[in-house]
Image (cartoon, rainbow, N blue to C red):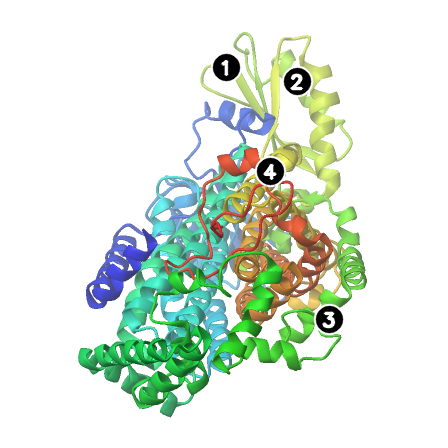
Amino acid sequence: MLLAAGRWCARRPKRTVAAWLLLLISLAAAVGAFGRVTSEAVTIPGSDSQAARDTAGAFADAASGRQPVVLYAPDGAAPLTSSGQRGAVEEAARAIEDVDHVVAVTTPYEPAGGGLGADGRTGRLTVELDVGGRDITPETTRAITDAAAPAARAGIEVTAGGDLAAAEDKGSTGHSEVIGLAAAFVVLALGFGSLVAAGVPLLTGAVGLGVSLCLIGLAGHLMDMPSSGATIAAMIGLGVGIDYTLFCLTRFRELLTAGVDVEDAAARTTAGSGKAVVFAGSAVVAALAGLAFGGLPLLHALALAPGIAVLAAMAATLTLLPAVLSLLGPRLAPGTRGGRKALRKRETRKERRPRERRKAWGERERAVRQEADDRGEPEGAATAATAASVADRTEAATDAPAPVRREAAAAGPGTASDRREEPGTAIGTATDRREAPAAEAAATGVERPETLAARTRPVDAPPGAGPAPAGWGRIAAFVASRPWRCLLAALALTGVLAVPATQLTYGQLDAGDKAAGTASRTSYDRLADAFGPGANGPLQVVSTLPTPASGPDDARITAVTAALRTTGGVASVGPAQLDASGTRVRWQVTPTTAPSDPDTVALVHRLRDETLPGAGEDAGLVTHVGGATAAQADLNERLTERMPLVVGFVLAVAALLLLVAFRSPVVAVKAALMNLVSVAASYGVLTAVFQWGWGATLIGLEGPVPIPGYVPLLMFAVLFGLAMDYEVFLLSAVRAAYLRDGDNRGAVIAGLAGTGRIITSAALIMVSVFLGYLLSDDPVVKMFGIGLATAVALDATVVRGVLVPSTMVLLGRANWWLPDALDRLLPRLAIEDDGHDDTEPPSPVTGGAPLAGTRSAS
């Protein structure tokens, strides 16, 4: 299917590119018409905070709740209590009431208002709107602050808070994407040696990213999509989009170098590398799907956003990329400009080569063989004579080097499959295949290049190595020759990095963790200085009465009020408020500590477990504690409970996908465990940098910040999926080499040597993209940037470069063991096959079923 899809797109490149551009323009127009909606609301079904929120729905509140606008009279200006300043504030309040969507404004001078600080220099207006927090736009916030101009002219500083500030602080991460793309272009240009080739991954990655971000923006109209969702999706979508294209483009260039025509090369690339892309992308999506077991709408949204980005990247790689490859054709070939011109000339020459010449080639071969038979010469001499005669006569008409031409002529005119069945090249034992090149050299007088390399390499070189391995080939040979030492060293390094993860605790961020100078941070600091840190995160206590209350002075209500005021950690308790039915009552409780302080979470539990049961149970009250701080506490507890289930699901899915792809339970289980190594190390770095504050100032933070519970969980799913990318590409190369030669150690060396450079380049691109997001002011975005960059860097170097090859060398042929019963159940997908498979499988592993795709020697 992939082969046909790739060929269809390659034959209709302009139509395919136009379809993608039309899709992108249409989605962008839809976003422009309907807008991009985000929401920071947290819904936790079945939690106490959600019950409090649902009960509070009986009160006639505005859709937005009460949003603060902080007023501050700096030194040199009259305090807010002066008559002149009071007049300016009241005039500003009347002007704000005329702003669209504003339904009520309360001044700090009214009993139900925001109040004034003890020094009279800080106060707050409370603004109620007819739209919820998700629908408050930056334009609405600017309209409100602009309407407060009378207060500003009086020397009062006006700063929006709450959801108004969050809307104003929404910033674009476009600069991060630009930095990531620029870094990727540099890496690609250096790796490919061609600006045209370097631009192809950026093109497909950018198109896929644009489509996915538009879809995510529209999805916000249907569900609560946090603002960080689109940012995380952009990080992952851009990284995998470039990586997938990089792997496919590398294969395409190899096929061009081998003399395959452009259309066929594009189709085979889609069938071979595209299959690996499908498996890798499916692993990411499946891992993200595991977050559904968290049972939280927030996790659903945070999983959906990057999932859309990955699917868009896969679609662009499998359809848009073949079209682009077909359009650019020989300009993507490796080598110098002159070499690419030569490739284009060769393509033209092959297309114009007359059929008569090929016919004459065959007739001459048959004539030479007939003459040898008439003279009674041995078959080997006739084969050699045929090879020399045909190769000499066709040297000018063929593009292959002379030794290879003579070898091909000696093999006869049959197909590759036919030649595999001839003596010396038939499928048999590893010993038979090692002896075949020597017999062929004796018959033809020509030694295969790989045989020559094996004969001239150093005695202590590992099997499969060339005369002088370099780069990743040298690293592969080193690891294969010292597997135990390399394994222990790599485990020690990752173990040290993972140690801080043992101290990882979940916390919650608040506006005090925002960047200095933002509206959220400014309003937070001023309210904390004037009213105490707890003013930024009051708790909502809501009770349901069995019978209507007589009023706020009802004995049942006053008993709860008194209990709340005497609870340790409570700074103040607001007056009780009854709903219209008199059966529901609520209090606003201000803690003595900040929302992100662990003591505030302890207060929530103390109210639920001790204070409220003792004050209201005897009277039949059903009481709940809500508010943003209580909701975050419930969120972290829910995530802690569901973490083992999510981890188990992701591990099982990852192992199952690898089992289906490579038909080896040992490889599947080992890969899943290896992925845990890089995840644990990234957790350790995350803990050290953010929870402990090591180097926090270097990334724009003022010190340690809490780590929300959903960050490690989402990181686990994403990292497991991304690690599968490199695992699939590495194991595809190793398995192809093993199917060809039957030498496990040589296959590991060949696989790592062949993919090490491209995997490292892909990881470098992804790390650059992730680190670019450190420029964001959002601490959560910084956490994902650091965590993902660390994990990818370790996975592509320490894990894939050392741990995986060393364990595979130690396990030997057990890597490819497959029980007979499992062999009958698993499909035969041959992920490394591109529709033109020439590989020769090794002999079956004793005690189990043969490898998928193996053919009998008979």
Instruction: Answer whether labels 2 and 1 touch (C-beta < 8 Å).
Output: no
SS of the residue under disc 3: helix
Q: Secondary structure at mark 4?
A: loop
The residues tagged by marks 2 and 4 sit, at their Cα atoms, a distance apart of 72 Å
Q: Earlier in the sequence, mark 2 or mark 3?
A: 3
Residue 17 position within the rendered picture, expressed as x and y whole percent measured from the top left: 25, 65
SS for callout 1:
loop
Tell me the amino acid under the disc marked 2: Thr
Q: CA distance from mark 2 to mark 3?
A: 77 Å
Query: Which disc, if any, is residue 148?
Result: none
Amino acid type shown at disc 1: Gly
Residue under circle 3? Answer: 478
Reading the image, the residue beneath label 1 is 582
Q: Which residue is denoted by mark 4 in the rendering?
A: 819
Q: Nearer the viewer, residue 156 or 593?
A: 593
Q: Nearer the viewer, residue 1 or 635?
A: 1
Residue 352, quarter of the rendered image: bottom left
